[in-house]
Amino acid sequence: MNEYELSLDNIFFFDAQIVGSHGKEFIASIVWLHNFQWSSWTRGVDGNEVLINQWNNSDAIVSFDEEEIVMSLMKSQFGLKYDAYINLVDYCDNHLTNMADEVGIAYPAELLDFKKSDSTKLWMEFIQGNDSALNSMLFFGAWNTDLIYHIFFQVCGDTVPLRVFIPWALEKQPTNLKVKRKKGKVQEKDLYNKLKRSYDFSSPGAAIDE
């Protein structure tokens, strides 16, 4: 942070909930944290303008794409570019939801039984008329996004500047058996130097050719 000033309010942290069978996946909902404010997009409910505008005008895009499918879907569904994309999976040795203890976040008790596959169940309930299922889906995405936000600063060797209250709640309790979470480790890598080589954060949106 000493060598240049990172525009923290212009980083786009997000999590996308993917549903559909193999080869026919699509993004059902997206939750993102940008300018220290929460926003969301839901298929068939929200227009794309806000999502596309904030994405395209961000200094960097940060997520945790374990399956390496999210960004290809963001491109195919929304036409979004991801030259400024940082995949935090490259800096961790475990699944996203196992990283909570490492970054000092208490895993929500209501999510102990929750798996990513539950998003599909919640989506089916939502399109059948259960609005609370969508609220639960957005809460799961927001909690993942908050975790991504914390992992980013852990990788950078810095403290989280602001904890932002999640405006959604898990209203639908899944019925899965309890899943034991394993502890993960954030790798010590100099992400700031990587960012500095790619982006000039002193001028929002400006890129430096490598």
Image: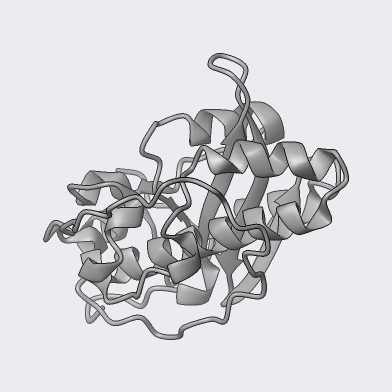
Foreground: 145 or 199? Answer: 145
| Residue farthest top in this picture | 23
Q: Residue at x 59, y 75 (%)?
A: 166
Query: In the displayed structure, does residue 119 sit left or right of residue 91?
Result: right
Q: Nearer the viewer, residue 143 or 36?
A: 143
Up the image or down, 129 lies above or below 20; here it is: below
Residue 25 in the image, given as x and y percentages of width and height: 60, 24
Residue at figure coordinates x 88%, y 45% from the top left? 129
Left/right placement of residue 116 relative to residue 45 reads left
- Point out the image quarter for the C terminus: top left
Identified at 29% across, 47% down, the residue is 95
- Residue found at the very far left of the displayed protein: 188
Q: Is residue 164 above or below residue 139?
A: below
Q: Quadrant of the N terminus?
A: bottom left
Q: How many marks do you count on the picture?
A: 0
Question: Which one is in front, 2 or 179?
Answer: 179
Asked if one can make out residue 57 in the rendered structure from this viewpoint, the answer is: no
Residue 200's x, y, as percent? Answer: 39, 62
Look at the image and name its color scheme. Answer: one colour
> Where residue 10 sits: x, y (%)?
53, 69
